[in-house]
Amino acid sequence: MESGANGTVRDVHPCYESRGGDYVFAANPSAACVLLYVVLGALSAATVCGNLLVMVSVTYFKRLRSPTNSLVLSLAAADLLVGVVVFPFSMVFTVTSCWHHDGAPCKVRGAFDVALSTASILNLCCIAADRYYAVCRPLTYGSKMSGRVVGAMVLASWTAAAAIGVGVTAAGFNQGKCEGGCLTDALISTTLACVFSFYIPVVVMLSIYLKILLVAHKQVASIRNARGGPGAVAEGKATRTLATVMGVFLLCWTPYFLCIVFQPLMVQATPVAVIETLNWLTLSNSMLNPVIYALFYGRFRSAFKIILSGKIFRDNLSNCKLL
């Protein structure tokens, strides 16, 4: 912390200062503050553009319209809203300011943050379930993952996410250190938020992807025995894809939720800069999802190239073949 000439005290956050008991945006933002907002603005723009590409691809190209890609479309919509709503809200009403003054804007920010992030996670669970039936139950995949079933999954994900976002915010989800007698309430609300928004979905996804890997390994072994072919390349690619999916997800989300769930029990508050950094790390997953769930597939790569080249504005390519 450092004291300014006017008697204000600058906290570890480069953009805010304590003035007369209020925690306000600094009158003269530092170079670090400007750089921070440039980086966060670029992150927000990349999140919006990447997920917008996914949404345009699925809605424009008929060869990408399928129940499976409807889940990808729902995921992209959730991540797009994170970039459009949560990022700007978090840049204006940061964890730092809301930590000290939990007013109406901070509650709105918290509700959107929790709801849209949870929607993104639940859509990832739906995609995992879809992949399970595609790999482990291929004969019943068409009936189990019909358009009606996928629509119900999407509706359930968004409804649950909205309920969790509103419920957790109303219950007083606390990202910082409690003061006074709020320990019990904060412990309950943060624990419930973490369990329903993160830990349960993570256990579900890990279980599903582990099952997929085991079944895929058996299928590759059967093909190798029947045809005498190597099969190791296909198995390795599937393993790397699934490892990337879960690895990036856990890397982005686990540090934040581990920090938050134990925060009310800490003797000293976790530094604001740490909470801020972990919070933005979780939001960055919405930027990476289009890369993980779209760029791994050739058809999406072809669709992206056509869109970015501007050809869809000159010709009707909705029925074109995507390699």
Image: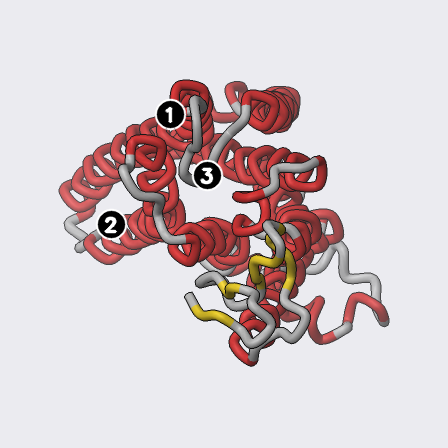
Out of 18 and 223, give the one closest to the viewer.
18
Q: Residue at 40% across / 38% down in the picture?
A: 177
Residue type for callout 2 = Glu
Q: Is residue 323 visible?
A: no
On the image, the x and y values in percent for residue 84 come to 70, 53
Question: Seen in the image, is 135 located left or right of residue 56?
Answer: left
Query: How far is the residue under mark 2 from the one under mark 1?
Result: 28 Å
* Placement of the C terminus among the 4 image quadrants: bottom right
Q: For the residue marked with disc 3, what is the amino acid?
A: Gln
- Amino acid on which the number 1 mark rests in the picture: Ile
Q: CA distance from mark 3 to mark 2?
A: 42 Å
Does the CB distance between marks 2 and 1 fall below 8 Å? no
Query: How many neighbours does mark 3 have within 10 angstroms: few (below 14), some (14-19), or many (20 or more)?
Result: many
Disc 2 crowd rating (10 Å Cα; few below 14, some 14-19, many 20+) is: some
The front one of 283 and 286 is 283
From this view, report whether residue 95 is shown above or below residue 107. below
Up/down of 94 relative to 185, above or below? below
At 63% from the left edge and 20% from the top edge, which residue is drawn?
A: 152
The mark that comes first in sequence, 3 or 2, is 3
Q: Label 1: which residue?
A: 200
Rendering colour mode: secondary structure
Q: Is residue 106 above or below residue 158?
A: below
**Circle 1 SS class:** helix
Nearer mark to the viewer, of 1 and 3? 3
Q: Which residue is mark 2?
A: 235
Residue labelled with disc 3: 175
Residue at image point 53% right, 34% down: 118
Q: Earlier in the sequence, mark 2 or mark 1?
A: 1
Mark 2, secondary structure of its residue: helix
